[in-house]
Image: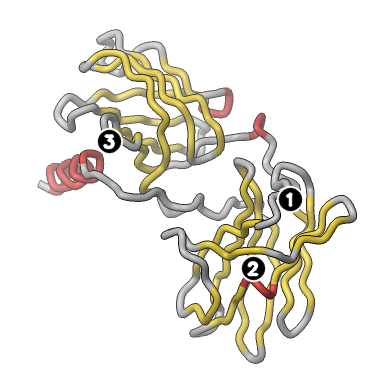
Amino acid sequence: MKKMVLGVALLCLLTASTAMSSFPPVPTDAEVYPVEHFYNIALMYSWAEGGELFVHFKLLCDRFYVCNKGFRLIQNGSEFSDLSLITESGTSFCGEMTDSQTFKLQDLSGLFSASDPFIVEFSANDIYQLSITPSASSALLPQSGIWKDTACTVSFYLQKYSTNSAAIVATTNGLNNVIFLDSDYTDGLYISNDLGNQGYSFRLVLKDRTNGTLIADLPGGRVLANVTVVYSVVQ
């Protein structure tokens, strides 16, 4: 009975339409520094991937104040302070957080490149600096979770394991589900035949950890779609 309930829940998630995608989860190798604003403390994580800069505040108290005016970027001797702190819903933020949160830090001048090394500086009780080296494309690994295209014509659940293997459940209609197993996802996600040996195939070409292009043969035919993570697995 429990397996049936879990299967139905997964099916509902795979077939539900989603209005927006989430920010990528904090990488395990993200730069981190404890920051203090008056008597409130948080851990500030920062990283760059896919040409974008992200900051995450993990609260160690019940609230923490953060604003775009407290940030500055330094790159190749140039300083960038005309910045916007963007939430997952796409709105600008400046105020108190009451829960841990990830933001995208955007340079409004258009001259900063998150694809090259830089320093992110945050001013509060002190001036805190993190040196960031963007993720190399050769080191990209897919995020575990539920992936979809914007038109919701294809969905798949991807789960990575400590052995570097991965399991994938893909569907175009929520009824005809195909299971794929990849023995080593670190060399790319390509499976030439499904677990049921029906001749279906799956290839995911990554742009970054949470975005890519899917090329697959599924029960509904050939699929070519840009896909993104809409529900991330909590690590």
Q: What residue would you read off at disc 3?
A: 152
Residue that lies at the very extreme toward the top in this rendered image: 199
Numbered disc 2: secondary structure? strand
Is 182 positioned to the left or the right of 38 in the image?
A: left
The earlier-in-sequence mark between 1 and 2 is: 2
10 Å crowding of disc 3: few (<14), some (14-19), many (20+): some
Residue drawn at 49 percent across, 85 percent down? 62
Kind of residue at badge 2: Met
Nearer to us in this view, 217 or 83: 83
The earlier-in-sequence mark between 1 and 3 is: 1
Residue drawn at 45 percent across, 37 percent down? 160
Residue drawn at 67 percent across, 57 percent down? 107
Q: Is residue 26 above or below residue 229?
A: below
In the image, residue 116 lies at what x, y percent? 76, 43
CA separation in Å, label 2 and label 3: 34 Å
**Residue contact between numbered discs 1 and 2, judged by CB atoms under 8 Å:** no
Is 52 positioned to the left or the right of 80 in the image?
A: left
Kind of residue at badge 1: Phe
Q: What residue would you read off at disc 1?
A: 112
CA separation in Å, label 1 and label 2: 21 Å
